Image (cartoon, rainbow, N blue to C red):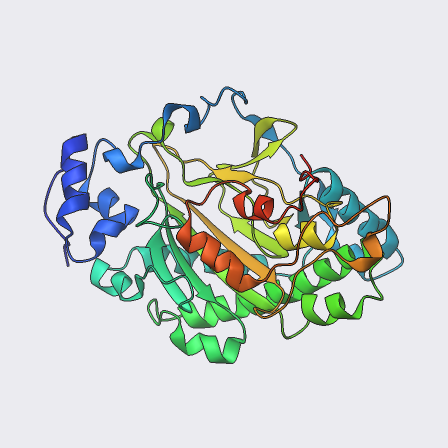
Amino acid sequence: MALISCDSSSREDGDEQLNKGCSLSFKTVKYLSEVGVKELPSRFILPEDKRPNTNSTVSTPLQYDLPVIDISGLEGPHRLQVVSAIGRACQQIGFFRVINHGVEESLLSDVMRVASEFFELPMEERQKFISEDMMKPVTYGTSFNYLRGQVVCWRDFLKHNCHPLDQMLPLWPSNPSDYRSVVSTYNKDVRRLGVRIMSAIVESLGLSHNKYIIENGYSDEGSQFMVINYYPACPEPELTLGIPPHSDYGCLNVLSEDSVGGFQLLHDGQWKEVRPLPNSFIVNIGDHIEIISNGRYKSVVHRAVVNSEKLRISVATLMSMPFQAKIAPAPELIDEHHPAMYRETNFAEYIYHLTSKEYKERAFLDSLTLHGHCTPN
């Protein structure tokens, strides 16, 4: 069934499509793509110094290969070497790539397929999940804070809570017909992978005896979200971004992506575009790990760019402490030479920050920095 028959060929037409509010579809990038905007609506255009490749502090993004870690080595005689490699990556880059991770390649393909099929559903099916309430177990939307943000980005997303799975599964989309079965299997496998990685990170910090972190950080109580990012081909990619620069809240983000590319991280003062690698995951640590490690490990700023030719899809699985957990530097990593760099925080404070302020870079993490200390570069 067709949505709306129109040909929006100018920036003014795109603005009109946003403002006239065709049901709730005015909120989605997919809708603008479907109606054929040829120029970006004004609200998607970033200030000149925020556009890709124009920020005076960085140059044209360099192609970059992340450290590749064979995660199967955690089980066997090479565990210490793998733990050490993970620790170095967390300290030096904040990102790494894992291979031989135990998630079947066919399952990775199936997740991308059902993700694509969901976004190809008629708008009336997708809009069932549209909400500005970030605490809802399932949310379909555009940008981090659509109503408050002055500029929005060229991305739609489907976010849902994945834990406890038996309670969350009935709330997920039932269309496509195999969405729930495919995505639930995927999330079980990725959760097992995340637990293994989190265990190695804790070990690399010398915190294997810290009962609080062990019980909360990678147990059945820890939280887990999945975000499917959908970036249609963009008519003017040089004027906008898919996701603005930000660091991730939580402990870990385990990212699967297609072969299109567009994921960039800020490293050594430059934007570097990470080359895709089939059948692997990009892993990055979030603000929780930087706080727990008292700044030893880095929650690094990253972003997504878009292009004028191809759709890009990525699937992010974010794992963290339970919602009620208090996050603070581990006492074992604090002494007279290394005082606490961050104050205690929790998930509720993060949600308030996310929904009440413009989302940008490391703003939340920086708000936790104790007086007299600077967050690591």
Residue 112 visible? The answer is: no
User: Horizontally, is 259 left or right of 103 in the view?
Assistant: left
Quadrant of the rendering where the C terminus is positioned: top right
Picture coordinates of residue 291, whole percent (x, y): 68, 52
The answer to which image quadrant residue 373 occupies is: top right
Quadrant of the rendering where the N terminus is positioned: bottom left
Position of 171 relative to 148 (above/below): below
Q: Residue at x 21, y 32 (%)?
A: 38
Picture coordinates of residue 286, whole percent (x, y): 62, 51
Residue 326 visible? The answer is: yes
User: Horizontally, is 54 left or right of 347 in the view?
Assistant: left
The residue sitting at the right extreme is 77
The residue sitting at the bottom extreme is 166
Q: Residue at x 43, y 28 (%)?
A: 50
Q: Residue at x 27, y 59 (%)?
A: 121
Position of 265 relative to 4 (above/below): above
Picture coordinates of residue 283, whole percent (x, y): 63, 49
The residue sitting at the left extreme is 5
Picture coordinates of residue 29, whole percent (x, y): 29, 46
User: Horizontally, is 231 left or right of 23 in the view?
Assistant: right
User: Horizontally, is 368 left or right of 183 in the view?
Assistant: right
